[in-house]
Structures are given as structure tokens and as C-alpha cells.
């Protein structure tokens, strides 16, 4: 079956349009789609693989990670992004399970990589991501792949035992992309901040796959600290932040600490939040807390929360300050998004409406049951 997703990506990487910004020493280095085309071409030429070989990416978020990710897919291989903070034993177990032909490793992770492959029983090719020599643009190749073929394997921590590899096809991923796009929550003019690691299904979809499919600009933070995140929100004029509940709690802690430091601010804040709770008018909240919005996230349209249940108090506190957190729900096996709140149909203590007209129903054991007739978006295989 025709692979529409590969064709979209191929056309995109020929465009000389800014797409990605990496923050270093307080400045933002710009990368165009064509710059990534060069990275893809370079990595492809160095991949000693046959079609459907597995290729592990063991790296922190970076432009090199993105280049290696698409180079692997375009080469006809199966990409396996893994947690960059794994120990050598943890990495060894995953390598033993998925038997990769190649490992892309960042320089930071090279020592762990070398330790992990010692007792593997064979010697995979190791490519250091940062060791690149780019000249003029050269065409990357693209192996035509059926939409039902496996595109990537994502390892989940699970609840017991060793991680299991979830095999996701192009069709799974494309179905999720279409489902999210149909909600019209993301616009081409949006600017997305990259905080969470790419190896996890949720940020992989929301901060890598979606931006590079629709040409949406994304900005990688320099440090995983509230201070650096907030400075990036302002400097880069971020409009959408995808995070986890712990991150939003950290933001609230910082806001409340500033208020606690000033008795007058504390009294004023209590008075204003009392009014906004009574008068549920969004523009009034933004007016009352104008200074807070200017100092924290002046351009944000939505915060999106996933990865764990969002405590209702966090959602309500943000709402009373004039911000909306749209909570969602998903699984690695569902590519990953199942449902999320819509801005016009927002509810507290809810993971929102399903995407793609997916059928959800509660079971007698208070679990969510997914319709087994909807095969496009759910993985049925473990590696």
C-alpha cells in the first residue's frame, strides 16, 4: 500500500525553510529542513545495513538525533530510540532483545555503549552522532516501504520485568497524525518547545513527528530547569508546551514562591484568584494576571499534559490564572494518543474526547475499553 507519510517527509526535507532551533549558551542555532536533509544523507551513507535491520539511537535530544531518526527510516530500516540515561546493563538487555545492526550514540553515551556491546555476541556498527562532515547538499535516498511495515520499536518500562519493545507501523503513526490534525488544535504558525526526551512515545509524536510533518517550528531547551524553560517560553515566543504533571507542579511552585516573598502580592493574589473563581471569564483572568503572563509565558495558547494523571488542583490553579492545560490519555501501543480535551469542550478530571472517532467505553472494572475494530492506530505486536 502506498506510503503517504514517507512522501510527505521526503518533500519536506528538500525545502530551505527554518524548522528547528537548538539553544546553546543562551543563543538559538537555526536549522532548516534542508539542513536536516544533509544530515539524513550523511548518516545514510554511513549506515551499513540491509532493509529492515534495526538501528538503535542512544542519545539525548539534538538535531543529530532527528537526522539519524529519519535517515534510518528512509534507508528502509527500523528505528529504535532508547532512553539516553540507561545503564550499560539496561542498554545491553535492550540490545540483546532487538539485535540492532547499528547503534547511533552521542559522545556522552559512547562509554556506556561500548560497555553494553562487550558481551552481546556480535559487534554492531557504532556511529558517533556528532562526528559529521557536511559539505554541500546531496540527495538522500528513500526506500519505498509499505504502510503496514514496522517503522519503529519503542521500549516501555512496563510494570513488571524487563522493558518490552512495542512495534509500530507507518499506518499506526499516520493514523495518529491524521487524528490529531483533524482536531485543529495545532496551527502552522505555532511554536513548540522541546522539553521531554524523544525516546518516549508522547514527546516523539508531539515534538518531533508532528512538527516535521506539518512544518511547525520547534525550540530545544538548553537545560532541564524551570528557569531555562521559562526563558525559552518568552524568548522563542512559544505557543504550545507539551509536558507532564510534575513539570506543571514545578511551575506553580515557582509562581507561589514569588508571591509568598511579598505580603502585599500575597494579599492581592488571593483577592484576584477569589474573583476569577467566581467570575469564570478567561480574558478577565488574563487582565488580572497580566504581569504574571508577561513574566511566565506571554505567548502560550495551550499547555498539554500527558504521561500521567494530572491532579485536578494543578489544572484548576492554572485555569484560575488564565491558562488552559489540555489533559490527554494514550499508550505507546496506541501510537500514542487516544484522547485529549478540546479547548471548546474542556473538562476538569477528564482526558477528553477520543481522536479519529475511536470507540471508548468504560468496563465494569472501571477500565477504559478500546474498540478492537480500529486497527489502524493500535499496535498488536511486541518485539
Image (cartoon, rainbow, N blue to C red):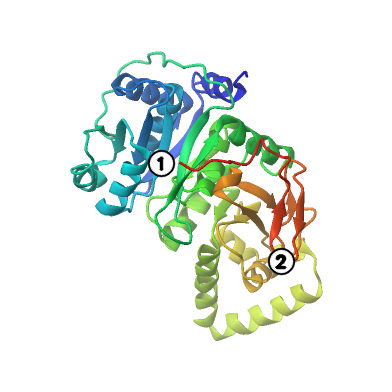
- Camera-side residue: 84 or 150? 150
Please provide percent x and percent y for residue 382.
50, 43
Closer to us: 266 or 77: 77
Relative side of 328 to 160, left or right: right
The kind of secondary structure element at disc 2 is: loop
Q: Viewed as shown, does residue 220 lie left or right of 145? A: left
Q: Can you say whether 43 is above or below 177 in the image?
A: above
* Residue 217 image-quadrant placement: top right
Is residue 236 in view? no
Marks 1 and 2 in Cβ contact (< 8 Å) = no
Residue 260 falls left or right of residue 289:
left
Q: Which quarter of the rendered picture does the C terminus lie within? A: top left
Numbered circles on residues, count? 2
Q: Is residue 125 visible?
A: yes
Residue sitting at x 33%, y 25%: 43
Picture quarter with the N terminus? top right
Q: Is 365 on the left or on the right of 217, as rendered?
A: right
* Front tag of 1 and 2: 2
Q: Tell me which residue sits at (38%, 37%) in the image.
A: 65
The numbered mark, 1 or 2, whose residue comes first in the sequence reads 1
Q: Residue 342 in the image: state x and y as whole percent.
A: 74, 52
Inter-mark Cα distance, 1 to 2: 33 Å
Q: Is residue 330 above or below residue 374?
A: below
Q: Element under label 1?
A: strand
Q: Residues within 10 Å of mark 2 (few under 14, many from 20)?
A: few
Residue designated by label 1: 81
Residue 153 location in percent, x, y?
46, 39
Residue 308, x across and y down, in percent: 56, 62
Q: Residue at x 76, y 77 (%)?
A: 275
Residue with the mark numbered 2: 366
Query: Disc number at residue 259?
Result: none
Amino acid at each position: 500500500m502506498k506510503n503517504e507519510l514517507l512522501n510527505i517527509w521526503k518533500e519536506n526535507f528538500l525545502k530551505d525553510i527554518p524548522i528547528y532551533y537548538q539553544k546553546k549558551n543562551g543563543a538559538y542555532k537555526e536549522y532548516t529542513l534542508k539542513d536536516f536533509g544533509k544530515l539524513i544523507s550523511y548518516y545514510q551513507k554511513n549506515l551499513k545495513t540491509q532493509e529492515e535491520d534495526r538501528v538503535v539511537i542512544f542519545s539525548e535530544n539534538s538535531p543529530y538525533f532527528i537526522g539519524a531518526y529519519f535517515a534510518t527510516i528512509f534507508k528502509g530500516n527500523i528505528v529504535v530510540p532508547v532512553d539516553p540515561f540507561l545503564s550499560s546493563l539496561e542498554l545491553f538487555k535492550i540490545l540483546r532483545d532487538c539485535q540492532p545492526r547499528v547503534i547511533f550514540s552521542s559522545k556522552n553515551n559512547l562509554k556506556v555503549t561500548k560497555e553494553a556491546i562487550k558481551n552481546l555476541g556480535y559487534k554492531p556498527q557504532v556511529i558517533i552522532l556528532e562526528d559529521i562532515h557536511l559539505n554541500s547538499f546531496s540527495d538522500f535516498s528513500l526506500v519505498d516501504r509499505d504502510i503496514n511495515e514496522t517503522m519503529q520499536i519503542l521500549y516501555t518500562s512496563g510494570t513488571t520485568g524487563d522493558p518490552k519493545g512495542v512495534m509500530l507501523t507507518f499506518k499506526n503513526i499516520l493514523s495518529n497524525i491524521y487524528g490529531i490534525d483533524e482536531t485543529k488544535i495545532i496551527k502552522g504558525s505555532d511554536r513548540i518547545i522541546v522539553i521531554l526526551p524523544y525516546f518516549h512515545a508522547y514527546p516523539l509524536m508531539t515534538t518531533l513527528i508532528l512538527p516535521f510533518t506539518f512544518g511547525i517550528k520547534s525550540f530545544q531547551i538548553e537545560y532541564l530547569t524551570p528557569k531555562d524553560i521559562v526563558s525559552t517560553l518568552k524568548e522563542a515566543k512559544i505557543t504550545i508546551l507539551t509536558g507532564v504533571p510534575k513539570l506543571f507542579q514545578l511551575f506553580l511552585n515557582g509562581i507561589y514562591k514569588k508571591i509568598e516573598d511579598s505580603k502585599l502580592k500575597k494579599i492581592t493574589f488571593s483577592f484576584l484568584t477569589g474573583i476569577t473563581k467566581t467570575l469564570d471569564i478567561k480574558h478577565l483572568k488574563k487582565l488580572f494576571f497580566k504581569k504574571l503572563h508577561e513574566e511566565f509565558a506571554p505567548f502560550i495558547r495551550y499547555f498539554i499534559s500527558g504521561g500521567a494523571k494530572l491532579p485536578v488542583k494543578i489544572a484548576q490553579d492554572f485555569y484560575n490564572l488564565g491558562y488552559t492545560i489540555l489533559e490527554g490519555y494514550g499508550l505507546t501501543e496506541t501510537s500514542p494518543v487516544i484522547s485529549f480535551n478540546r479547548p471548546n469542550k474542556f473538562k476538569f478530571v477528564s482526558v477528553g474526547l477520543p481522536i479519529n472517532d475511536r470507540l471508548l467505553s468504560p468496563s465494569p472494572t472501571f477500565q477504559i475499553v478500546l474498540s478492537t475494530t480500529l486497527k489502524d492506530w493500535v499496535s498488536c505486536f511486541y518485539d
